[in-house]
Structure formats: C-alpha cells, structure tokens
Amino acid sequence: MVKATRFSFLSHPFVLLFISILSISMSSIMIKYSDTPTSVAGMYRLFISVIIMLVFVPWKRFRSLGLNRKEWLIVILAGILLGLHLLFWMESLVYTSVASSMVILSLQPLIVMIGSYFLFQEKVNRMTYFCLFIALLGSISIAWGDIGVSKEALIGDGLSLIGTFFISAYFLAGQKVSRKIDTSVYSIIVFVIGGIVLLIYNLINNYNLLGYDSTDWTYFLLLAIIPTILGQSIFNLLLKSIGATTVSVGIIGEPVLAIILAYLLLGETISVFQFLGGMMTLFGMGMYFWSKSLKYHVQK
C-alpha cells in the first residue's frame, strides 16, 4: 500500500511538472558558464538524448504509428520549432543575464493561452488571469535589477523573445498531436528534427563539431539527461494530461528555481527584488495549481 501510494504521488501530473521545471532550471546555469558554442551544445543535447532514449523505447512503438499526413507535418513542425527555440534562447544567454532572459520566457503562458483559445477553444476564467498576473509581476520583480539596457542586452532580450514564441508554438503543436502518438516516440522524433536544424546551422557557420575535451562532452551529456530527458520529454508527456497552458504556467517558476540553484551551486546573492518577486511568483503559481488540482480531483 505504501509503495502504491508513493508511486501514485510521483506519477501525479503536478509532481512530474515540478521535476521537469527543476530539471529545465539547471540548463540556464550550465549554458551561462560554458564556453562552447550554444548551437553546438544544443545539437548534442538533443542527439545524445535520442541515443539514450532509444535504449529504452521498443522498436515496435515506431512501427505502430498511425499518423496521417497532416499529423506528420505537425510533428515535423514541432521538431523544427524546438530546434529554433534552443538556437535563439540558448544564444540569448550569451548577450543578456539569466534573469532577464527568464522574465521574457515567462511571457510564454500568455502566448500559449491565446493560441489554446483559438486552436482548442480553451476558455480561461478570471481566477487564472489573476494568478497569472501575480506570477508574471513576480517574474518582472525578479529581473528588475538585472535587466540590461546596453546594445548587447537588447540583442539578448530580442533573441529570448523570439525563442519564447518558438517554444510556445512547440507546445501548442505538441498538444495537437499528443494523443495520437506515444510520448517517448514523439520526443525522439522531435529531438532528432530539432538536432538536425541545429546541425544545419552549425555547418553553415563552420562551427567545430568534434574538437572538444572531456569536460565539454560531460557538459553535453548533462544537458541531455537533466533539462532534455527529465525536462522536455516530461513536458511532452504532460501535454496529454494537463495541456500546454498549464505546462507553460509552471515554467514561470523556472526563474525562481534558477536563482535558488545559482545561490546554492554558484554562490550568487539573492537581492530583495529577487526574493520578493520569487515569493509573488510562487504565490501566483500556487493559487493557479491549487485551483487546477481541485478541478483535477473532481474529474477523477
């Protein structure tokens, strides 16, 4: 009974969402403190993830795909969008701060919410708007003292904004086909396509693809395991059960977790704005997921 309860707890969508957000939060720290080209790191991040996942996914799942042409086009589009997101967002961290890039990324729920309304006729109540407003206000407070106004910072913020649009579209595309395809197979396919997008970019720019030392390859491996397999692939799984909007709202908590991790792992200080903003973000998210959990239990 204890084991069953424990398994049930770990398989709860909101617990899985927290694990995935925590995993994704590690990526910004690893990217910020690495000298390897971000597009190369992103490419290997996806390709290594595919190699690892193929070990655990039976080939019969690939043979049983029943997607029509339109659905295959959506899957391919999702992979391209993922590759473009990683390209623009990871590159943004070269020019701007983690906090500044994250606060722009926190606009993602708004984009997804609008897209979900037009694509899936998902309506949002006033409580959701209130919770999202509080969480976004907290994210802005987190980055208030760290948003740059230099030319480089503006370039980084622009790249982050473009990357935010791409990842929002990626989640919407994933929700469109999530119930038609096995999650592991879907993740592998979009990771391969995203990796090819980054490979083409690297070849065009004549980036070195092999001349890296063991530290760099360890970095690529960690990016594959933590933010990709434990992050993106769980996001893909959750699109089936809780939808793109709820997954996106959860990602608002990424700046808070990234700041906490930077404090614990890198010795960075936490400002008053960051502390207060983090509390506001967590409060807004907590209210949102509390209301969602009530609806989740009623549906069960």
Image (tube, rainbow, N blue to C red):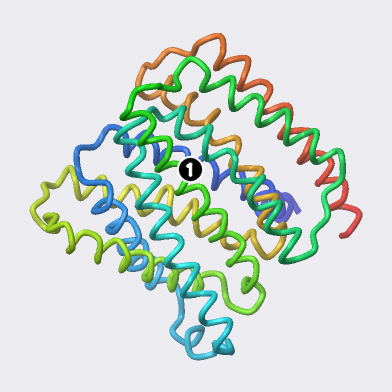
- For label 1, the crowd category at 10 Å Cα-Cα, with few meaning under 14, some 14 to 19 and many 20 or more, is many
Which is more toward the observer, 194 or 118?
118
Residue 274, visible in the rendered structure: yes
269 in relation to 153, above or below: above
Q: Does 253 sit left or right of 261 as displayed?
A: right
Q: Amino acid at mark 1?
A: Leu
Q: In the rendered image, which quarter is residue 79 located in?
A: bottom left
Residue lying farthest left?
211
Q: Residue at x 70, y 51 (%)?
A: 113
Which is more toward the observer, 239 or 4?
239
Residue lying farthest right?
298
Residue 26 in percent (x, y) is at: 42, 38
For the N terminus, give its image quadrant: bottom right
Residue 73 in percent (x, y) is at: 51, 80
Q: Residue at x 68, y 22 (%)?
A: 280
Q: Does 152 sit left or right of 115 as displayed?
A: left
Which is more toward the observer, 82 or 114?
114
Q: Does 88 sit left or right of 5 as displayed?
A: left
Query: Circle 1 — which element?
Result: helix
Q: Residue at x 57, y 54 (%)?
A: 168
Residue 62 in percent (x, y) is at: 47, 85
Q: Which residue is mark 1?
A: 161
For the C terminus, give its image quadrant: bottom right
188 in relation to 98, above or below: below
146 in relation to 83, above or below: above
Residue lying farthest top?
272
Residue 3, visible in the rendered structure: no
Total numbered circles:
1
